[in-house]
Amino acid sequence: MLYRFKALAKRRDPDQLDVPLALASPRGWVVTLVIGFCMLALIGWGFLGRVPQHVTVTGRLQYPGGLVTMQSDARGTVKKLTELGVTLDQGDALAYLQRGAGEDDARISGVTGGRVIQNLVSVGDVVDAGTPISVVEPGATEGAALEAVVEVPAWQIPSVSRGQDVKLTVSGIPSVQYGVLRGRVESLAPFPAATDGTQVGPTQVVIRLERADTVSGYAWTSHNGPDRRIESQTPVVADISIGEVPPLALLGA
C-alpha cells in the first residue's frame, strides 16, 4: 500500500505540546461578539422599548342626540307624511291622520324637531296610538357637528378613557387616498348598552371629531381629506390609541 509523502512526513514530526491551541479564529470571535451584542440589544429593547396599543371597534357617524322614533298619538288613516330629508323645527307637523266621520284630522308634531331620515308608515296606512310613524335625527341642524358613536366590548372598555386619540376610517372614503378622520374620546356611557343576564354587553363610546378648514369640515390625516361632505349614519371603524407598553409585557398577554 502506497502512502502520500506528506502524510508520512507529518507522522514523523514530534507532537508540538508547547504551542498554544487556537480555540477560535479571529473571525469566529467577531461573529460571537456581534451575536452577543444583538442579544443584549434585544433584551434591552424588551425592557425599555415601547409598543403602541390600540382598540379597534366599529360604529357610525351621527349628530348629537342620535335617532328618535316618533309615534302617533291618535288612531286614524295616514293622510300626509313629511318627505325624507326635510328638517323640522320643534313642534312642526310630522304627519296628518284622517280620523272618523265628523272628526278633525289629527296632527302629529315633531316634538323634538330635526331631520326626517325614515318614514315607517305609508300614506293610506291605518295606525293606532303608539304606532311608530317616522325616525327623526334631532341634532341635524344647520352648523351642527358630527360625532362618532362606537361600541367597545366589555373586556376592552377598562383601557378606554376620555381624551384618547382616535383615527376613524370612513366607509366609502379610500383611506389610502384621503387618509382617516381625527378625533378624541369625548365620553363613555355609564352602563353597558345591553345585558343578557350572563354576559355584559358593549359600552357606547362617543368620539368628538376634530374640526378643520376642509371641504368636509373635519380634520384628516391627509392634508385636505375628501372633496365632499360626509353624512350621518355612515359606518366607521375606530382605532383608539390606549397608550404604549414594553414588548415583554406582550408575552403575558
Image: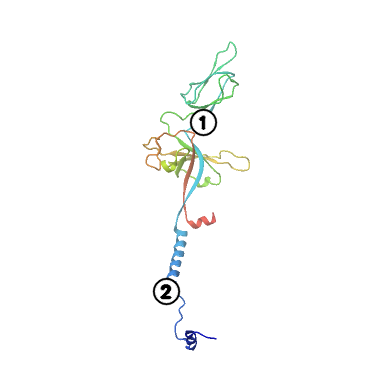
Reply above or below: 204 against 44.
above
Give percent across and percent down for residue 195.
60, 40
Q: Residues within 10 Å of mark 1 (few under 14, many from 20)?
A: some
**Amino acid tagged 2:** Pro
The reply, left or right, for residue 177 in relation to residue 190 is left
Quadrant where the C terminus lies?
Answer: bottom right
Tag 2–tag 1 contact (CB < 8 Å): no
Which residue is tagged 1?
Answer: 67
Secondary structure under the numbered disc 1 in the rendered image: loop
Name the side, left or right, on which 224 lies relative to 251.
Answer: left
Which residue type does callout 1 highlight? Leu
Q: Residue at x 47, y 84 (%)?
A: 6
Q: Could you tell me residue 131's position as x and y percent?
A: 59, 24
Task: Tell me which label, 2 or 1, sits earlier in the chain.
Answer: 2
Q: Which residue is mark 2?
A: 26
> Which residue occupies 42% across, 74% down?
26
Q: Quadrant of the N terminus?
A: bottom right
- On the image, the x and y values in percent for residue 190 come to 53, 40
